[in-house]
Image (cartoon, rainbow, N blue to C red):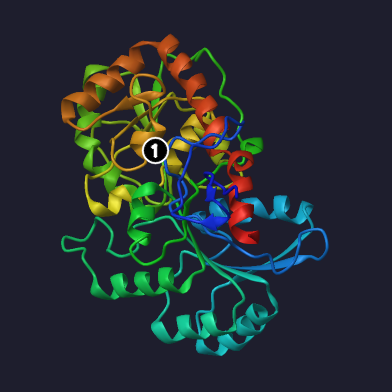
Amino acid sequence: MDTAQGRILKDKGKIGKPKIFQPPQTKIRYPFPPPYRFQAEYAIFNRRMGEAEKEILFLIQGRNVASSRYRILQYLPYLNRENIKTEVADFARKASEWPKVLKKVRKSDVLVIQRKQIGFMKTKMLKKISRKIVYDFDDTLWVKSARHGKNQSMSRNLKFKWMVDLADEVIAGNTFLAERALKYNPNVTVIPTPLDLSRYSIRSYPNTSDEVIIGWIGAHGSIHYLKRIIPILEKIHAMNPKIRLKVICDTFPSSRTLPIEKVTWNEKTEVDHLKTMDIGLMPLMEDEWSRGKCGLKVLQYFAVGIPAVATPVGINRDIVKDGETGFWARTEKEWIDRILLLASDPSLRRTMGLKARETVENYYSVEACYPIFKKVLTA
């Protein structure tokens, strides 16, 4: 039997211990070390696709929440084109909203819960009335964020265990997250956060401006990573005054010496602003929370054809090929040397940027990830 990530061999008609093999070479390839699929599952279709419509209910945090937009909403047109009915609902925030949600759950064939963690009794209730539950997550949800000095949390850890144990299938955004989920559920699939490349075009080369724009895009919850390297960026600017910083967010760092262009994030304009950058930044801390990051910033830089300088933590090590699509940087010296090198060499930026775009096309586009996503939901 073929699975999404490998092939199971049968011995004399009896199912033995699964052996996971590399899939044959296809257009869809993944940068993660094998096995991609951690536990093969023999599933029985309740309905054969084509004979009847499947109905999938997605419970999300909100249509403007990045995780919901990139990991769920982008797939809906693809599912609908294949005669799969979809419904999207925000997660119930009040007790009075739960009866309406439960009614939707009962009539669906598949319930997909995106990232949200709930209490023990609610998980039991959903398990009892659901035909199939898929849990998707893309962060280190069992601890608090890196902003907290003591980020271990017993309550978060318990909720994470309940959610993963509840699910029939689990989708994790990277291998670090998948390894944690495997402690509580054997059916885990890695699907990275994809981009719809129809929204992203490659920036113009060569850069006709004398300025070199290093850029950062993200939510306010991650701005502390950028703030940590502002003193380094100030030193870089002092060495090369043509370098300035562009930040796309809803909150911003400050500096007395480094010019910072502050752009309020807007979905309609974010790509145009990304295309004005020459170098993308993704600094992280080397901690448990950061290892769960799924590299969306880097993928957005790559999608418009610009190289990135990033901390080699978690999925950043898989996405950024050091010296090919960008550079890794841990120490102050590495940040300074890598950024100054790229700033001084437009040809290198172009070569790396075009290679970076190919990385997204092959591994991190919606088109590349959709077949695996669909298989997890419908099998």
- Left or right side of 204 for 260: left
Q: What residue sits 30% from the left and 22% below the top?
A: 339
Q: Assign a secondary structure to mark 1.
A: loop
The local crowd at label 1, few if under 14, some if 14 to 19, many if 20 or more residues have their Cα within 10 Å, is few
**Front residue of this view, candidates 202 and 36:** 36
Residue at the right extreme of this rendering: 51
Q: What residue sits 81% from the left and 58% below the top?
A: 50
- Amino acid type of the residue that numbered disc 1 sits on in the rendered structure: Pro
Q: How many marks?
A: 1
Q: What residue sits 54% from the left and 25% below the top?
A: 358
Q: Is residue 293 visible?
A: no
Q: What residue sits 59% from the left and 52% below the top?
A: 373
**Front residue of this view, candidates 13 and 144:** 13
Quarter occupied by residue 180: bottom left
- Identify the image quadrant of the C terminus: bottom right
Q: Is residue 206 visible?
A: yes
Residue 105, x across and y down, in percent: 63, 78
- Residue 188, above or below 216: below
Residue 173, x across and y down, in percent: 44, 51
- Residue 176, above or below 126: above
**Front residue of this view, candidates 268 and 145:** 145
Residue 191, x across and y down, in percent: 50, 48
What residue does disc 1 label? 33
Residue 327, x across and y down, in percent: 32, 25
- Residue 3, above or below 163: above
- Left or right side of 312 for 356: right
